[in-house]
Amino acid sequence: MAPTFKVLIAGAGIGGATLAVLLERANVDYLLFESSPTAPQQGSVIILTPNIMPLMGQLGLIRKLEAISKRVHAMNLSEDSMKRIGEIDLSDHLERTGYHSLVMARSDLIELLLSQVPKEKIHFNKRIMSFQQNKDEVTIRCADDTQFQGQILVGADGADSGVRINLFKLLAKKGILNRVDAEETVRDHLSFVGVTRPLSQEEYAILSEENSHCHTIVSDRTPPFTWSYYTIPGNRICWSLDTQLDDISIRERQLLNEKQQEDPQQQGHLWEMESFKQNPLLEKARNFALPIGGTLADFIEVSENISKAESDERLYETWHHGRTVLMGDACHMMLPNAGQGAVVAMLDAVILANLFHELQSATSENLVEMFKDYQAARYPSVKAQMSLNQKVGKIMTGQTWTEALIRKVMVRCMSKVFHLFNDSRILSDQPQASFLPLVENKGKIAALPQRRRRKSSSSSGDKSPKH
């Protein structure tokens, strides 16, 4: 019997779109809300590691993924003098897991996922301003004064999650917000990312290569910069520029954000002041050299969209309350230069979808237990992943003299450091949709047993299927 509750999903990014696809297959009622007028275009490149491929196989999307992506066999590393450091070898992924890692434009992946969702279930231009929840339902109010009711609200709306902000305000008002979660987040990492329009293979020979040509340049400038580029289908190149802000820059950004919040009418003016091509840091980076010749300005000038993000690593302790639950960057923010945030959000979606499928009645008591199971299943893996991300982030863009010294030493060992992200512990975390036929394990690394809820395991003799 199909569940009799409705799930409201805030955010049609990677995590929210994945959850919507899974709930559609699980026959769970839902609606998906996105603040943008179209599918989110922010961001640049996505590297899908083998962890998520069994799920894509279950959904029948492997061939479609391959059509919008290129395989990654190696990632090259250089100093900003263009002196080669070495490469990160990913050629063993196929043998270890049965799958390649794939590189694609973030927007292409989102469009693929949303193509699997009925159009009538996606509501664009719906910025959620607030919500109210009681013992029976949750009601969201959007910026256009429309309202929607359901039994569960999922905040999949990113690092600046409006759902999380409203939820934490509610908890703070009740005097029950975790002390750590009440602390202000200091966004000290700045990233610019873009995707070029189709380019000429005569001008960029790397575009003709079957596999993605990936290159990361690690700089010891002040502040330290890291810039990367990846070739993707359609003769396009995804690029990124990452740096760590100093204390003065952080305060300037905080003041700008405060002005935007105090006077919404000035947002357009401030946006012009922060125009990407006039941003001092981006201007400074225009002359950064590329191993293929030319400079980063060559990519900036031919980019169809450029996005900017301020971020930091942040793992919240509060993931749920009442009828509201958080996922992805809304509850665990990851630095974009680590490249793992999207995959982790998709893994969150798998666990949530499995629990929603098993939930027959969305009573307050059932939701408390279900959300506890969700956080218990995901929190340890996310914490371990973020610990590794922080180490790599400090190596790539840390500003202290000790971090600079570590960078000089460790950057030549980045292949080994990167493989920490892809060792057996990480690659074996391959949850699948419990309501779809399981995909058999294809590689040498055994996938972890499919997790089930405590109540289900106790009633079935803990016959958890392996995959």
Image (cartoon, rainbow, N blue to C red):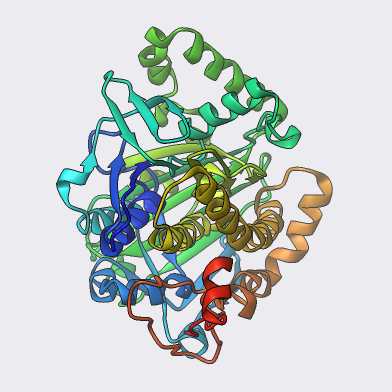
> For the point 55% across and 51% down, which residue is it?
371
> For the point 42% across and 58% down, which residue is it?
359
Is 323 placed left or right of 357 in the picture? right
Quarter placement of the N terminus: bottom left
Q: Residue 306, can we see it?
A: yes
Rendered image quadrant of residue 39: top left
Q: Is residue 241 above or below residue 160?
A: below
Tell which of 316 and 207 is nearer to you: 316
Q: Position of residue 341 (x, y in %)?
A: 51, 55
Q: Position of residue 360 (x, y in %)?
A: 39, 57
Rendered image quadrant of residue 379: bottom right
Is 322 placed left or right of 39 in the picture? right
Q: Is residue 162 above or below residue 343?
A: above
> For the point 47% across and 61% down, which residue is it?
343
Tell which of 29 and 333 is nearer to you: 29
Q: Is residue 156 above or below residue 65?
A: above
Tell which of 285 and 341 is nearer to you: 341
Q: Position of residue 342 (x, y in %)?
A: 46, 56
Rendered image quadrant of residue 177: top right
Q: Position of residue 208 (x, y in %)?
A: 27, 72
Q: Residue 35, can we see it?
A: no
Tell which of 368 and 449 is nearer to you: 368
Q: How many marks?
A: 0
